[in-house]
Image (cartoon, grey):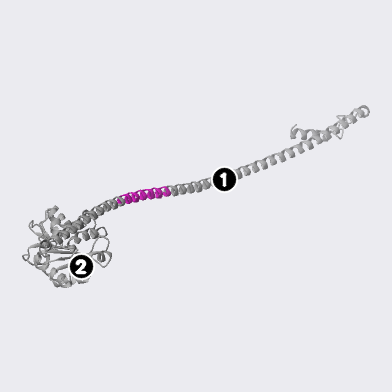
Amino acid sequence: MSEARFAEALSRLDENKQLRLPLKRGDILGRLALRFLWRRGIKWQVESNLAIRDALGTVREIAHEQRSALAGVSAAVTEIGDAGAASRDGLRAEIEDLRRNDQNMMAGLNQRLYAAIGSVRSEIGDLRLQVADKQEHAGQVEARLGAIESDLAALVATARESALRHARLDSFLDAARTDPAKAESLPGRPDFLELSVAALLDGPADLARARRAEYLPVVRDARGQDAGAAVFDVAPGRGEWLEVLRGEGIPFVAASTNPVVVDHCAELGLTVRPEPALDALAASPRRSLAAVTAFRYAERQAPEDLARFVEAAALALRPGGVLLVETPLVGADFHVDPFAIRPVHPTFARYLAESAGFAKVEIREVPATARAGAEHFCLIAWT
């Protein structure tokens, strides 16, 4: 029942609780009869009405309580909804935090992973470089061993050649003992020794030729366009430098008093004058030579002879000509040479060239690849 109907029922009960019966005011007997007859029914009715009123009041109270309960339930539901919403919001925030933390963790993990990958790649690159370097060094070692073996074979051949020359010398000496007339024309032991010493100091002839060939650019510049400009060499030795000049088509002049050197060069097809080199140089026409060269020569001369040699070269060289003098510094190379008299200091060599009138003088260290066991320097002087 609605609240309006409950109110209406209660209102009717209140109106009838005073027993307002429809009786006429002048009918006294009727009123008494009705009052007597209806008393019981009215009493019952009143009690019924009161009971109904009480029931209705109870129902109203119950309804009120139900409405209060429903309101509480609604409030609880609302609170639950609000709490659920708050819980959902908290859950969303927590999920968002977890997602951010996961992203941060994955970013850090990826960063470390890529850093580790980069480190591994770098280590792989280093290992590859080390492997390549070791392979390169291995190739260099193999090449060096091959060169050493080649040099050893050449030295063995040189030693055999030297032994053969000594055998020839012994044969000549034996012949001189039996025929004194031949003794005056036989070479002396130092003459035979010169070629052996050259092999000992300069190594195989191929290696010596390669070292001498490094001076070709200087000689070419000094010759210029003059195809007839010659080179004078005062110490032909085994003829390596003369072979280099011949290979380049450069004319040369050489002289030596050692008959063994003259014969050896002749066997190679090289012409060497059998006369003192310094005298031959001094006799050369003035301003006629493109270059004057000397290898294994300066350290074997007395100071006055060396000065004379430099002066003779200055007179024989044409303008723009060059003087090349390679000589060792004090070291094993110098002390092994039995023909060396005294080492030439670079300052003294420069002084001799400048005193002789050379316009430009340089002292160059012989490159490491061109050294033969000790440090050398080369005097290069231009007229």
- In the rendered image, the quadrant that contains the C terminus is bottom left
Q: Quadrant of residue 2?
A: top right
Q: Who's the residue at 79% across and 37% down the image?
A: 61
Residue found at x 44% / y 48%: 118
- 10 Å crowding of disc 1: few (<14), some (14-19), many (20+): few
Residue closer to the observer: 301 or 69: 301
**SS label for mark 2:** helix
* Amino acid type assigned to the residue bearing label 1 in the image: Leu
* Three-letter residue code for mark 2: Glu
Disc 2: which residue: 299
Q: Position of residue 62 (x, y in %)?
A: 78, 36
In this figure, which residue is indicated by the disc labeled 1?
A: 98
Q: Is residue 162 visible?
A: yes
Question: Is residue 124 magenta-colored?
Answer: yes
Is disc 1 placed on a helix, strand or loop?
helix
Which residues lie in the magenta part?
A: 122-143
Viewport quadrant of the N terminus: top right
Left or right of residue 114: residue 342: left
